[in-house]
Amino acid sequence: MSATIRLKKFGTKKRPYYRIVVIDKRAPRDGKTIEELGYYHPIEAEDKQILLSEDKVKAWLQNGAIVSDTVRKILNKKNISL
């Protein structure tokens, strides 16, 4: 099983928010997750947009999880090295 760190969409039309999750690569976007690592609210104020558990992210990266492009940009905003 190859794990991927990617976004899972929630919210309503024009008011989305996302959870940053670890999910099987073959699973659908909003399918069953392995673990939730944080959230991303693109509409909120800049300081409230991103909440991450950095320890969990680093642990999954060490175990070989693949990061999606969008999550990579979010991690760069929080200065988490890949």
Image (cartoon, rainbow, N blue to C red):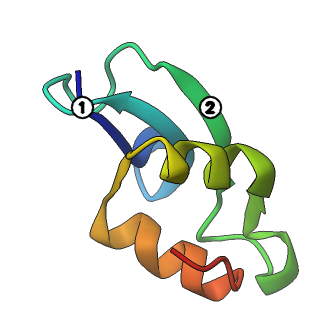
Direction top: furthest residue: 32
The mark that comes first in sequence, 2 or 1, is 1
Q: Please identify the quarter of the rendering in which residue 77 is found.
A: bottom right
Q: Please identify the quarter of the rendering in which residue 43 is found.
A: bottom right
Q: What residue type is labelled 2?
A: Glu
Direction left: furthest residue: 26
Which callout, 2 or 1, points to the residue nearer the camera? 1
Helix, strand or loop for disc 2:
strand
Residue 70 sits above or below residue 61 on the image: below
Q: Which amino acid does label 1 sit on?
A: Ser
Q: Please identify the quarter of the rendering in which residue 9 is found.
A: top left
Say the numbered circle drawn on residue 2: 1
Say the numbered circle drawn on residue 30: none
Residue at 62% of width from left, 31% of height from top? Answer: 36
Residue at the disc numbered 2: 36
Residue 82: where, in percent of width, then height? 50, 74
Residue at 50% of width from left, 53% of height from top? Answer: 61
Residue 1: where, in percent of width, then height? 23, 21
Helix, strand or loop for disc 1:
loop
The answer to whether 66 appears left or right of 56 in the picture is left
Residue in the foreground of this view, choosing between 65 and 72: 65
Residue in the foreground of this view, choosing between 9 and 6: 6
Residue 72: where, in percent of width, then height? 43, 73
Q: Residues within 10 Å of mark 2 (few under 14, many from 20)?
A: some
Residue at 46% of width from left, 81% of height from top? Answer: 73
Residue in the foreground of this view, choosing between 13 and 66: 66
Direction right: furthest residue: 47
